[in-house]
Image: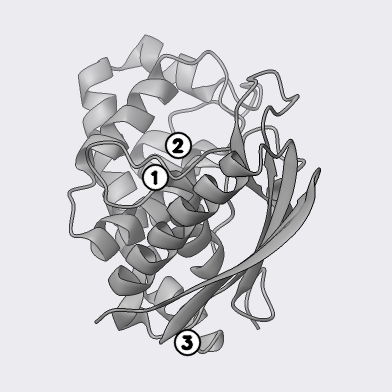
Amino acid sequence: MHEFLKTPQVAATYHSEWQDGFGAQGWKLNLAIDDPCVIACTSYTGAKSPTSVIVHDILDHLISGFWLSGYSNEARATAIHGLRNGIEVCSSYEWMISEIVTSKYVAESLDNFFPPSVFKKIPADILPGQGIAFLLEQENIEDISNLMLQEFINTGIKGIPVAAKNWEELGLDFGKMHAIGLCLQALLEEADKVVTEWISVEAVVNIIIGNDKCEFLVKSRDPIKSVNLERLVDI
């Protein structure tokens, strides 16, 4: 059974301004609506990827079976993102590693980030989350970062067959993930225009993902409006 979903459908909520400490505008997946590590986003893609963060969250995380927060989940989802869009992932891993080595506290277990030869150097009495600070007192930061990079790459590679299995369990063709991603991106851009034109404070969308067609069922709560957006998956 799939880790999070029973069918290839996800719901998201739009706020013109989220009261989450960031004041972000955009969509947030309902499954993670209470997760403070997940920030709302729009259809904006940036320079590196042809699809936005929320498409990454849907396809590379949830559909693939990896939760939306946590470095080990992000390592695996980043590998799927790279495979889906044909882009390199090492720079993304390096950014995550830089964040880890400059943190005084890392909540996740360090055995996700280091080979056993390094992890066993951490004394048993070190407080949870403070192992990284201990290692950086003993080891060169560049050496630690290089070891972590290899572990991130390995974790990402190991996640690919897991993701393929989860896609199959939902009846989705893993080989079509690039085309499905572009289809979702186009629909998301349409949905962004719709809620902007409606001057919506809050809206919800039910996203239906298929191998041949995807749909966005968008409803606004203020004003009360709805629209059904659909698009074929181009191969």
Rendered residue at 60%/31% (across/down): 25
Is residue 39 visible in this depiction of the protein? no
Residue name at image x 38 percent, y 72 percent: 180
Does 212 sit above or below residue 157?
below
User: Could you say which disc has been placed on residue 168 in the image?
Assistant: 3
Question: How far is the residue under mark 1 from the one under mark 2?
Answer: 6 Å
Image point 46% across, 62% down: which residue? 187
Q: Is label 3 or label 1 in front?
A: 3
What is the distance, in whole Å, between disc 2 and disc 3 at their CAs? Answer: 38 Å
Q: Mark 3 and mark 1: span between their CA atoms?
A: 33 Å
Q: How many marks?
A: 3
Position of residue 205 measured from the top left corner of the image (x, y, whole percent)? 67, 59
2 or 3: mark nearer the eye: 3
SS class of the residue under badge 1? helix
> In the rendered view, does 142 fall on the left or right side of 44?
left
Of the numbered discs 3 and 1, the one sitting upstream in the chain is: 1
Dot 1 alpha-carbon crowd within 10 angstroms: few under 14, some 14 to 19, many 20 or more: few
Decide if residue 177 is on the left or right side of residue 37: left
Asked which quadrant contains residue 109, the reply is top right
Frontmost residue, 27 versus 219: 219
First of labels 2, 3 by sequence position: 2
Residue nearer the viewer, 26 or 199: 199
Crowd class of label 3 (few under 14; some 14 to 19; many from 20; radius 10 Å): some
Residue marked by disc 2: 120
Q: Which amino acid does label 3 sit on?
A: Glu
Say whether residue 105 is left or right of residue 173.
right
x, y (%) of residue 9?
Answer: 63, 73
**Disc sitting over residue 116 in the figure:** 1
